[in-house]
Amino acid sequence: MITFFSRKRTSSLALAIALATGAAVATTAVMPAEASAQRKKKKDENDGGGYSKEFIAVYQPLNELMNTEGSDLASQRAQFDALAGLLNTPDEKIAGGGLMFNSGVRLQDPALQLQGMEAMLASGKVDAANAGRYNFIAYQLADRLNMTGKARTYLQAAIDNNFTTDTITPASLRIAMMESYFGNSEFDAGFKYLKDAVAQQKAAGQPVDEAWYRRGISVAYENELSPTVYEVATMWLADFPSEGNWRDAINIARNLNEFKPAEMLDLFRLARQTGALNSASDYDFYIEVADARRLPSEVKSIIEEGKAAGILVDSNLYMVEQLGIANSRLASDRADLPALEADASAPNAGLRTVVAAGDAFLSYGQYDKAIKFYERAVTMPGVEMNEELNRLAIAQIGAGDYAAARESLSRISGSRMPLAMLWTAYADELEGETGAAPAAPATM
């Protein structure tokens, strides 16, 4: 089963730190005489700054009330609305906004806090050291007030200004942005943001945090979004190709689909190659869909590998029975290969014979011969095209021809699409490894 995904729909991620609701911000106090002088100076300089007398008349008593311990600030709540209408110059916005924000903290009024923070940010006077923090506060407040558009705008500004704390990383901010989309079921936009963020991170030569992928996969899995879940999974596997991650990706495909036995066989072949087989039940299922009567070499190899790994034991009666069948069939099956090859190579060979030859040689790891017969099969009328393209790609991967395998896999549609995407990720992984040896999907 999947190890880290749940079927619970999640709401917007809360980045909880005491910035928005529990901490005041430093602002410039406006004293009447100073304000008058500044207003005259700014007016003379004609730079749009300074303080109007109307602003001072409303601001000053509110500021004194705010700074008086035990004062009844709540009774003057309406005056803050009046003050908001008087914030015209940069100086008025930074001073008035700071007063509104700090008063909002004291009154536990997030709407007033946001109004004040927006005014300060609009002033252009927030210093660079605080820009990220102030935008993050505005994001928190807007998110709390369900103002999604504003929340995203301020969160992006916090990201752009490189905001972090001891507990908040750039990756967690990106996840918060994704959550703003996912929480509103805006999945297309959310996954576009994820893909763009990954591309930007890589273009900058920076590593991608695995948490981005894990959250994206979790949301896609919970909401059964196909092919999105496999698109994100292949991105994840490209950067973090561990056995455990492969196991999770393969289990996602198993859990979201009702695969037929032939499809399960090719999924288990991928699990075998990526080290994702780790339970007796998986081995038993693999042995069943491979069928010791049809593919004795592959079944024998699977069982021997499972026993060597300590996963299959002799007390497993089903395994013992199937190993006996495989051993009894192996010599004759191998002896029949030359005749099968000749029959399948004949100009008048039927589709069934050609496919059987491809399957047999694939199970013995004779990839060049398997490729030849699968390539012929996909040109014949009545072929199960997606199945034979998948098997052709597996053989091409085994032969080390990853480009050809990707081309074959790109032609697959329908129920085998998840398999095609995961096998493509495996081909990419092998090609990216230095000195990668050809894969061996089903050899002795």
Image (cartoon, rainbow, N blue to C red):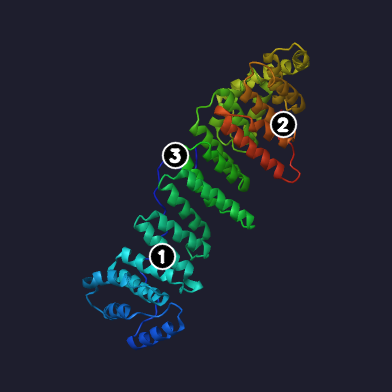
Would residue 9 appear left or right of 329 to someone viewing this image? left
**Which amino acid type is shown beneath numbered disc 1?**
Ile
Q: Are marks 2 and 1 in contact (CB under 8 Å)?
A: no
Q: Do the residues labelled 3 and 1 touch (CB within 8 Å)?
A: no
Secondary element at image label 1? helix
In the displayed structure, 241 sits above or below 279; it is below
Label annotation for residue 51: none
Secondary element at image label 3? loop
Query: Residue 142: x and y, percent?
Result: 38, 59
Front residue of 105/120: it is: 120
What residue occupies the far top of the structure in this picture?
A: 348
Front residue of 430/108: it is: 108
Query: Residue 218: x and y, percent?
Result: 48, 44
Q: Mark 1 points at which residue?
A: 137
Q: Can residue 12 be seen in this view?
A: yes
Residue at 41% from the left image edge and 48% from the top image edge: 183
Determine crowd level at label 1: few under 14, some 14-19, many 20+ residues with C-alpha closer than 10 A: many
Determine crowd level at label 2: few under 14, some 14-19, many 20+ residues with C-alpha closer than 10 A: many
Q: Name the residue under label 2.
A: 396
Q: Which of marks 2 and 1 is nearer the N terminus?
A: 1
Q: Name the residue under label 3.
A: 223
User: Gap in Å between the C-alphas at discs 2 and 1?
Assistant: 54 Å
User: Gap in Å between the C-alphas at discs 3 and 1?
Assistant: 31 Å
Q: Can residue 441 be seen in this view?
A: no
User: Gap in Å between the C-alphas at discs 2 and 3?
Assistant: 34 Å
